[in-house]
Structure formats: C-alpha cells, structure tokens
Amino acid sequence: MKTLLKNGLIVDGNNTKPYIGNVLIENNFITAVGNINTDDADNIIELNGLTIAPGFIDTHSHSDLEILSQPDVLPKIMQGITTEILGQDGISMAPLPIKYINPWCKNLAGLDGENDTIDWNYQTTKNYLKMIDNIKPALNECYLVPHGNIRMEAMGLDNRQPTDKEIQKMCDITQREIENGAIGLSSGLIYMPCAYSKTDEIIAMCKVVAKYDGIFVVHQRSEADTIINSMKEIIDIGKKSGVKIHFSHFKVCGKKNWQYVDTMLRLIDEAEKEGIKISFDQYPYVAGSTMLGVILPPWVHDGGTNKVLERLQDKTLRKKMIYDIEHGIDGWDNFIDFAGLDGIYITSVKHKQNENAVGLNLVELGKLKNKNPYDATFDLLLEEENAVGMVDFYGSEEHVKRFLQRPEMNACTDGLLSGKPHPRVYGAFPRILGKYVREEKALKLEEAIYKMTKKPANTFHIAKRGQLKAGYYADITIFDKDTIIDKGTFTNPVQYPEGIHYVFVNGQIVIKNKKHTSIRSGKVLRKQGIDVIL
C-alpha cells in the first residue's frame, strides 16, 4: 500500500526551513520526502499547502491506566500526538506486588483514575506492557519505571530510609524493569513514597539507568520556595551517577518565587558546561494539575493512602495539618501557599454525590458545604478516598515563553484524563502552534515542530521517529498552520483543537479529514541497549 502526500508544507523535524513538497508512505514507513512524485501510489492525498510534520511526541503523559480501557486515547490523537511516554512522576502501574494492589490503587487514583475491570495481578513492567500490546493502542507507548513502585516493592510504603540491602534491591528491580522494556526511571519527589528518599538512594538507581544510556525524568522536590536547592540536588544526581537528567514540567510556582528564574537557568547553563546532560519538558499554560492530596503535609501520607484516611478522621491531626499548611514546613512545596485556596480547583471525583464539587475552588467548596475551606477539603478527600484531581494557578506568561525558547525544552501535555481535566489534555501542542508560533511569534514554526518531534525522540532514544525521513516510521501529523489552535478552557476543557486534518501512526490513517477513523495502529516501544525498538 503506497500513499502519496502531495503539495504539503514540509516541516521535517530538523529545525530547517519549511518547503513545499511530497511525502511517500509505503506500509509502515516513509520511503521518500521532497520533490518526488509517483504514478503507482494507491492513494494520493492533495494537501494544497497544509503542513506535514512528524507525529508529535508527548514526553509526559498520564494515560497509564486509561490506555487499558480507552485505547484510542482521543485527547492525544486528535491533537496530533502519535507517541507518548507513560510512567511519570514516580507513581504508575508497574511494578506492582500483589500484596500492595489495594493501597497502591488508592495512591494512583488521584493521578491516573480508577479501573475495576482490569486484572491487577500483572506484577511487572513486562506483563503490564504485554497488556498494552494486547489491547492494540491507537498511538505508540513508551514506559518509564517509577521510583515509587520500585521503592514499594523493595521496602514497602513506610517513611523510613532503606538499608544497604534494600538499596541494592531497588537497583536490581530498576535493572530488571529496564531490561523488560522501560526507557528510563521517573521520580516524583513531592509524591509518596518517592518523597521519603534521600539523594544517595536516587543516585544508586540512576547509576543503573546510566549503564543502559537511559534517562532520569523527575518532578523535583520543589518548584516553589526551595527550587534552587531542589535543582542543585537533581544536577548533583546527574553529576554523580552519569545519568541524563530530564526535568518534568519545568516551571516555578508562586509570584514570590519568580525571582529565581535567572538563577534556575544559570544552574542549567553551568551544569551543561560541566558535561551534565539536561533537558526538560513544558506544557504551555500558567496553571498545573495533579492530585488534590498534595496539599496535605508530607507526614500525613506516611504509610500510604489508608493511613491518610485514618488521619483525616482525627480532629486533632486536622488542626496540625492546617497549622502546617498556614505556617509551612521547610522544603515542602505548599500548594495552598503559592496558589491560594481560591486558586485551586477540583477537577475530578469518583462518587456521584460529590460531582457538584467539580469546577469549584476550595473557597467555593467551603461555601457549598457550609464549612471552612480546610474542613470541606479534608472531608472531600476522606469521602473520595484521596481520589480527587485538581488544577492550581501558579505561573506567568512571560516565563512560559522564556522556557519555551530554551534549547533544552520539548513539549508535553502532562495530562490527567479523569473528570473535568486541565485543558492541556486536549490542546497543549496546538496551543503552542497557534498561540506561541502564529499569534505571538515566540517561536518559528520549524523550531516548535523540532521541539515536538526530533528533540524528544533524540532525548529519549526513540529510534526512527521524530523526523520526516526515508526509512523512518510513518508517524505523521498534517495540520493547517493558519487555523490550528486549542479550544479547551478551564471551565470547558473537553474540546478537541482546531486545525488537525490527518494523523498517521505507523503508516495507518488514524485521523482523516479531521475525523477519527477508529484505526488503532500504535505499538509499545521498548528499550534495548541504547535504542527503542518495536
């Protein structure tokens, strides 16, 4: 089967000047790019100047559970994403020892939702990835082995430091899971149990990752008051382990902390001069999204979600929680401090009786429940067993653009898919192309496409993807550069973007004339050596 994409504006992923030309696809692969023609194509698509780009790569995704029940992953496909990286923030699906299934499902719910229909007894990354293979995903899926899962298997969920034997066990698990297909290691150092770890524990695991030329992807300990020390810790991990560092959703939270931006960027520059490899991803919004439970002080999470729920029932401990939130704890990212009770909005719950809370900020939640905002929030977390999502407003448009222009940057969604999600789930990539390329001219078109395609492919060693090049897989996104834009808002986020006309995944048409074809042609991309293979 040969398909000719004719008369398109070719933006090949190499950050080179666009030009009008053709792309020939044969079965799964691109076979020719440029001023070519063929008389024997089975299918000719006349594009009349629409932009032809490599398929977009989302380096921070939370489709980990959703992919098993909704393998079309329409929020991603409809915005031109053809490959995504799962296993983020140190909390994901595998490894998962059977004895921890119940507490871990509760811990995972705030990020990735819930699913009672799957068999949770898969235990390892190898078996989890087989499950994704079996459901035939619509897009390509890569996986990072999560620090929290590794720590749980090695030593449980308690807040304590590991023995030397337990650190070795974490290293062994890390090696096992990379050999079973993970492309690197992730950690979320504000999430439990990752937050209990000290730097030496992470360095030990990262040495294993470095042996495989993998990558360490990290939500650092602080993106607010102590961000400078936090960045120094991560850079030190890179220096002492030799691993490549990738900061997740790079940003600084809270107006009082915007003063640190120059120092943050100087730290990266200095580290790179020392030979430390650093990259980061970014979503193009001034608000973030995560599980509501992060507003609770770290000690509340000690022992896992069941312990959280016990403590939320204790009135004396609630008073301590409020005190710690209002006075702060050294080194803890206090979301209420930098976003405010009125800057944190409920996005998802699991029980019907609390659906009226979705879309409210915490002040409004208090008014709805006729309680003070703290008790209303604690009650909601208790009733929902901590499975509540949130959006928090923290940032500056100036910083979005400044980080967007950095050479280390590539695009991501960081999209939580449950409930009333952050609009980035549906529109992060079109927003960059519409708002920041066309309207604000913060980037050239070819620069933005490079940051969505070849840059992440190179960073994560995703082989034969990220470029329009003969011999590469035919992951291709075709859009109208004059109309592409995100449509979702924080009040109405579930809207597909404008301007995406065609999407090919491994040579198959998944989006045709702006409509989903129901074809699922994605694959799990596993790591072997320094390449990701099929």
Image: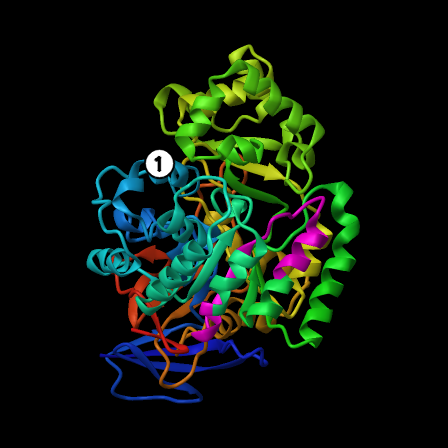
Q: Does dot 1 land on a helix, a strand or a loop?
A: helix
78 lies left or right of 400:
left
Q: How many marks?
A: 1
- Tell me where residue 500 sits by quadrant: bottom left
Q: Is residue 390 magenta?
A: no
The residue positioned 70% from the left and 53% from the top of the image is 229
| Extent of the magenta region | 208-234
Q: Nearer the viewer, residue 438 or 504?
A: 504
Residue 465 sits above or below residue 57 on the image: below
Q: Nearer the viewer, residue 44 or 360?
A: 360
The residue positioned 69% from the left and 66% from the top of the image is 268
Image quadrant occupied by the C terminus: bottom left
- Tell me where residue 401 sits by quadrant: bottom right
525 lies left or right of 171:
left
In the rendering, at what x and y percent does residue 507 appear? 30, 73
The residue positioned 51% from the left and 71% from the top of the image is 459
Q: Nearer the viewer, residue 128 or 341?
A: 128
Circle 1 crowding by C-alpha within 10 Å: few under 14, some 14–19, many from 20: some
In the rendering, at what x and y percent does residue 120 appear? 24, 45
- The color scheme shown is rainbow
- Tell me where residue 521 sits by quadrant: bottom left
Residue 490 sits above or below residue 316 on the image: below
The residue indicated by pointer 1 is 103
Considering every residue shown, the one lying at the far front of the view is 164
Residue 291 sits above or below residue 486 on the image: above
